[in-house]
Image: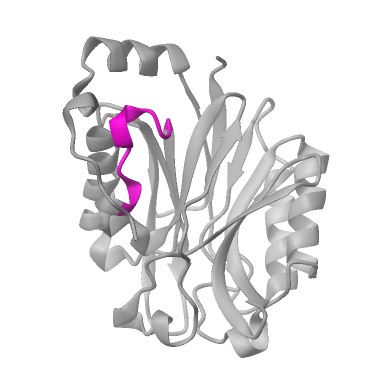
Amino acid sequence: MNDLHITLVQSDLHWEDPEANMAMFGEKLARLPEGTDLVVLPEMFPTGFSLNPKKLAQTMEGPVVRWMQATARRLGSVVTGSLMIREEGRYFNRLVWAVPDGTLGVYDKRHLFSPGKEDGEFTRGNKRLIARLRGWKICLNICYDLRFPAWTSNQGGSEFDLLLYTASWPGKRNLAWNTLLQARAIENQCYVAGVNRVGSDPSGELYDGDSSLIGPSGEILERIPEKEALISGRISWKELETLRQSFPFLRDGDRVMLS
């Protein structure tokens, strides 16, 4: 098994302007550290967290997904982040997992943010996506999913090795963001990567970033507040396996039935 080199892209976003955001992220990724295996972009990275899918949603054959595929191919890295997708008359907040060979994985956000009326505009997903990269099993999630531990229960400690969250998480709730990222790592004995945006949006929400890479004992490996940055780190398979073998507590856990 190989270590995994991850880069989280913490950025402000151009409101409801996919072309400007694609150009901006293209410039940022020109400075991508060599050897990066996985690039993670914020939630709804082409538009910001807008509730206007009738105007802004694209198809899986649209320009943003094509840009993700082309960027993954050019960088030789998996590129992932969420965007609004229109499919069969419904709208989804969909995380797209773009592999350099052109293949795609998708995860539709399970927990739609009802306090912000996201559930009134989008259809919730009904299944997890556990992607594979260089032997690692990666469970993919979007923002509000972070609050629901049953959805990301690492059954027996073997379902996944890395939990990933792409988010637009407001600064006024950053204590919850930081605490829950560490909690998910500890309770699942896995690495956690969470990317959040910075800046503000027209609703008045402020975003403080705190994009983080968390170790499987809850230790903070990388965390950057309040500024645009590429946050890169390497996670160790050897350290993960050593911890799991020395303290295999997940074998004693309860089975969680997902529905």
Q: How many marks?
A: 0
Side of 205 relative to 129 (left or right): left
**In this view, 174 is above or below 233:** below
| Quarter of the picture holding the C terminus | bottom left
The picture places residue 125, in percent across and down from the top left corner, at: 48, 66
The picture places residue 120, in percent across and down from the top left corner, at: 42, 87
Q: Nearer the viewer, residue 130 or 176?
A: 130
**In this view, 71 is above or below 89:** above
Q: Which residues are magenta?
A: 151-161
Q: Residue at x 49, y 74 (%)?
A: 49
Q: Quadrant of residue 132?
A: top right
| Quarter of the picture holding the N terminus | top right
Q: Nearer the viewer, residue 258 or 46?
A: 258
Q: Residue at x 80, y 60 (%)?
A: 66
Q: Residue at x 27, y 58 (%)?
A: 147
Side of 204 relative to 86 (left or right): left
The picture places residue 187, in percent across and down from the top left corner, at: 22, 36
**In this view, 24 is above or below 163:** below
**Residue 27 seen in the current view:** yes
* Residue 41 on the magenta span: no
**In this view, 66 is above or below 99:** below
* Residue 156 on the magenta span: yes
Q: Nearer the viewer, residue 215 or 172?
A: 215
Side of 112 relative to 217 (left or right): right
The picture places residue 198, in percent across and down from the top left corner, at: 45, 61
Q: Residue at x 55, y 34 (%)?
A: 6
